[in-house]
Amino acid sequence: MKDIFNYQDPIKFVKAVYYNFRPIPLPKPFKDGTGGMGKNAPEQGCLELYDSEGACAHLSVGRSFVKNILPLILNGETKSYSQWRDSLYWRMRNSGFQSGQAVEVGQLDLMMLDILAQRAGKPLHRFLGAEKDWAAAYKGGGSLLLEDEELVEDMTRYVEEGYKTVKFKVGSDDGTNMERDIRRLEKVRKAVGPDIGVAVDANQRWEVEEAFQFAKLAEPYNLAWFEEPIHSHDMNGIKRLKEMGVSMPIAFGESMRIYYAYETYVEKGVDHLQPSIGRMTRIDDILKIRDLAREKGVTFSSGGRIYLNAIFGCLYNENEKIEYHEPISKPVGAYTLFQPEERDGRFYCQPDLPGNPQRMNIEKLERDGLLESKQIFMADK
């Protein structure tokens, strides 16, 4: 399959600045069916990456990016976008295309697209071909640590904010307490009414037989989808679930990093494909997966930090939504500049700021004691 992004623009990286964070605390600890996020957001730091023409890309990346990628690109060489991406992609092949190293190549991919959009003087979504400045969204949250009443309050608030689909976690007590999960599902469905989509996410908690049991118990509540009921790589388990007669749509994808896995998902019976922005090894795979979903007649949505997700969501249609995971994204958003506008179940991107305008607010992080260190790296002459 040909690449969608095949830019030949030359890029020479001249400088990088890495801001190392202390853990960013969540207002409330969060838990899903297989452990979840705990007490802190996953962000470790952010990188400013400069090219020789004065553009500066900015992205939240882990410390391993500094170790693995910077020595390979701050070497004084000039290559096209495609040459940088392809050479690093295949360099990482023996680590596996699900590996963190391969995902870091995808993160560099995002930063190079940011640089090219800045050079063109266009917002990144318009540079990539979007004809609108908004993305349709659904809202997720629903920690297993919430009491029933707190869960219902959150889900009804999401609906009042204009979202037509909401999602929460299942897999209570290490997956052993389906009675609690179904009780909560019943309460949420009653509270939001029959016309709102209600989805649940098991985060790969169960084996096939257990997932089937939950699906049968959940049938009366008309689920929009049942997300990751079993191990995300158990392709034949997914096929078995469909053959056993699971009636609601099954969703997978946030744990996969390459396009080809989604072809297999569709073949095994997955009804809803869910790649995650910032976790892919090649960023145009996002659009390939979108197009695969359209071709095969399955549902498509994407996850990830909200601004990047909204940028790509501008390339989707009304029925192809982005996820806004409030319990994790909102606390991180408090430390960013240029958040997209959230309104009536949509996110609106800046129509006139070149590139990806989102930046971590370094001054605020420093004021709050969350900036641990700053490192500057210069390219070889």
Image (cartoon, rainbow, N blue to C red):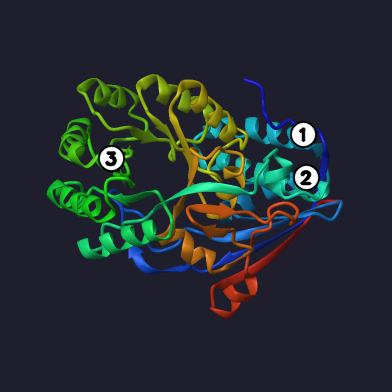
Quadrant in which the N terminus is drawn:
top right
C-alpha gap between disc 3 and disc 1: 42 Å
- Mark 2 lies on a secondary structure that is helix
Identify residue type, mark 3.
Answer: Leu
Query: Residue at left 66%, top 68%?
Result: 374
Does residue 71 show up?
Answer: no
What residue did someone put label 3 on? 223
Cβ atoms at labels 2 and 1 below 8 Å apart: yes
Query: Residue at left 19%, top 32%?
Result: 212
Identify residue type, mark 1.
Answer: Tyr
Q: Quadrant of residue 148?
A: bottom left
Image spot of residue 189 (x, y percent): 24, 50
Cβ atoms at labels 2 and 3 below 8 Å apart: no
* Labels 2 and 3: the sequence-earlier one: 2
Image spot of residue 365 (x, y percent): 58, 73
Foreground label between 3 and 1? 3
The numbered dot on residue 116 is 2
Query: Residue at left 61%, top 44%?
Result: 314
Query: Residue at left 53%, top 35%?
Result: 95
* Of residues 74 and 253, the one drawn nearer to the viewer in this rendering: 253
Cβ atoms at labels 3 and 1 below 8 Å apart: no
What residue did someone put label 1 on? 7
